[in-house]
Image (tube, helix red, strand yellow):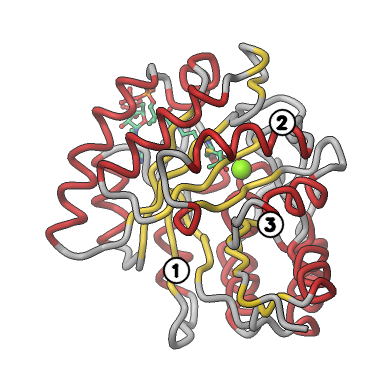
């Protein structure tokens, strides 16, 4: 029985690789994105225009976007923390961009050296500019259940940041369990609060698998109507400013899980397996 469509937003080349300590060449990154382009994703996050002092691994993002073979119908996305990052992303040909905020002050400070309010102020001109050229902007909210610095995060705090980003024009809000501390219960409580302010069809789940519960959290989200999930091929990744954050939930596992449940993802599992092998080979 078909359960209808479900989408995986591939974040491996960005969230996955940003945390790798060893220097990964632009050629290897391009090869990974090209392999993923064969698998049927509609959106692949493959670049990040942040300070190279903060995340050295993403320094070659412009060259990655220049080097990939763009598959028709695929949007290649980039992270942008400020207007400078936005300009660089546009110049490099990103098809969509993402701004990233936190639901907790501690992580906001450590990750982007700004309060939540300051980060929102920085994003406002990005969203204004993007609107004038019809560039889609995605909004991340990190630490949706727990912060590595501040501890438990209230669902209302997540809802407030999600609401703000959505009102500013983000077309989708990706809810990040940055350190994989969520459980089906805490994820459901958070989603119930966020669903009240942002339509569930505009939400995505972004679950790191530190606690080994990412798949259970996906199931909890599915039951509440979420149909977009971020995942990283090969289970790569983490965030350098979130101690203990291990990889994102692995794309190949999510794709197989969703297929098993009867959701249509449009993904080619063999092509994903090949990309996953490539990704694992890049791991330190
Ligand atoms: P800052 O130090 O407060 O800002 O950093 P600054 O304006 O003083 O800039 C510092 C230096 O960076 C300067 O260089 C700037 O020119 C340069 P210097 O003068 O010292 O030589 N700079 C830039 N360079 C390139 N591109 C830019 C840029 N902006 C400034 N766009 C800043 C503030 C936001 C820049 C910094 O904190 C930063 O880059 N942070 C990014 C951290 C990051 O990328 N974290 C990982 C991504 S978030 C994540 O993984 C979570 C997510 O997956 C969801 C989840 O799991 O929860 C999305
Ligand atoms: Mg992440």
Residue 8 point in image, percent of width and height: 62, 66
In front here: 17 or 178?
178
**Residue 222: assigned label:** 3
Q: Is residue 146 above or below residue 166?
A: above
- Residue that appears at 45% across and 68% down: 76
Label 1, label 2: how many angstroms apart (C-alpha)? 32 Å
Label 3, label 1: how many angstroms apart (C-alpha)? 25 Å
Q: Residues within 10 Å of mark 1 (few under 14, many from 20)?
A: many
Q: Mark 2 — residue?
A: 186
Foreground tag (3 vs 1): 3
Figure quadrant of residue 250: bottom right
Element under label 2?
helix
Label 3, label 2: how many angstroms apart (C-alpha)? 14 Å
Question: Pointer 3 and pointer 2: residues touching (CB < 8 Å)?
Answer: no
In front here: 166 or 209?
166
Element under label 1?
strand
- Residue that appears at 78% across and 81% down: 269
Q: Residues within 10 Å of mark 3 (few under 14, many from 20)?
A: some
Q: Residues within 10 Å of mark 2 (few under 14, many from 20)?
A: some
Residue 32 point in image, percent of width and height: 65, 70
| Nearest to N terminus: mark 1 or mark 2 | 1
Residue 30 point in image, percent of width and height: 57, 71
Residue 3 point in image, percent of width and height: 70, 75
| Nearest to N terminus: mark 3 or mark 2 | 2
Element under label 3?
helix
Q: Is residue 152 above or below residue 97?
A: above
- Residue that appears at 87% across and 42% down: 212
Q: Mark 1 — residue?
A: 76
In-image side of 239 versus 161 (left or right): right
- Residue that appears at 76% across and 34% down: 185
**Residue 215: assigned label:** none
Q: Residue furthest left?
A: 132
């Amino acid at each position: 029985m078909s359960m209808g469509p479900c989408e995986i937003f591939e974040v491996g080349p960005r969230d996955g690789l940003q945390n790798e300590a060893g220097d990964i060449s632009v050629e290897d990154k391009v090869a990974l994105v090209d392999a993923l382009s064969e698998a049927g994703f509609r959106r692949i996050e493959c670049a990040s225009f942040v300070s190279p002092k903060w995340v050295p691994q993403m320094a070659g993002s412009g060259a990655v976007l220049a080097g990939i073979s763009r598959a028709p119908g695929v949007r290649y996305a980039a992270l942008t923390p400020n207007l400078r990052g936005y300009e660089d992303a546009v110049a490099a040909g990103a098809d969509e961009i993402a701004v990233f905020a936190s639901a907790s002050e501690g992580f906001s400070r450590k990750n982007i050296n700004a309060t939540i309010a300051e980060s929102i102020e920085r994003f406002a001109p990005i969203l204004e500019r993007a609107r004038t050229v019809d560039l889609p902007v995605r909004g991340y909210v990190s630490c949706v259940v727990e912060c590595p610095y501040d501890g438990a995060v209230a669902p209302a705090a997540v809802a407030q940041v999600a609401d703000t980003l959505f009102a500013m024009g983000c077309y989708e809000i990706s809810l990040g369990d940055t350190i994989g501390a969520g459980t089906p219960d805490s994820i459901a409580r958070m989603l119930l609060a966020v669903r009240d302010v942002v339509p569930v069809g505009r939400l995505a789940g972004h679950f790191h698998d530190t606690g080994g519960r990412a798949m259970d959290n996906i199931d909890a989200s599915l039951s509440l109507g979420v149909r977009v999930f971020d995942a990283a091929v090969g289970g790569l990744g983490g965030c350098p400013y979130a101690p203990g954050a291990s990889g994102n939930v692995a794309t190949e596992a999510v794709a197989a899980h969703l297929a098993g449940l009867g959701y249509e993802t449009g993904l080619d599992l063999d092509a994903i397996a090949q990309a996953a092998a490539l990704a694992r080979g890049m791991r330190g």
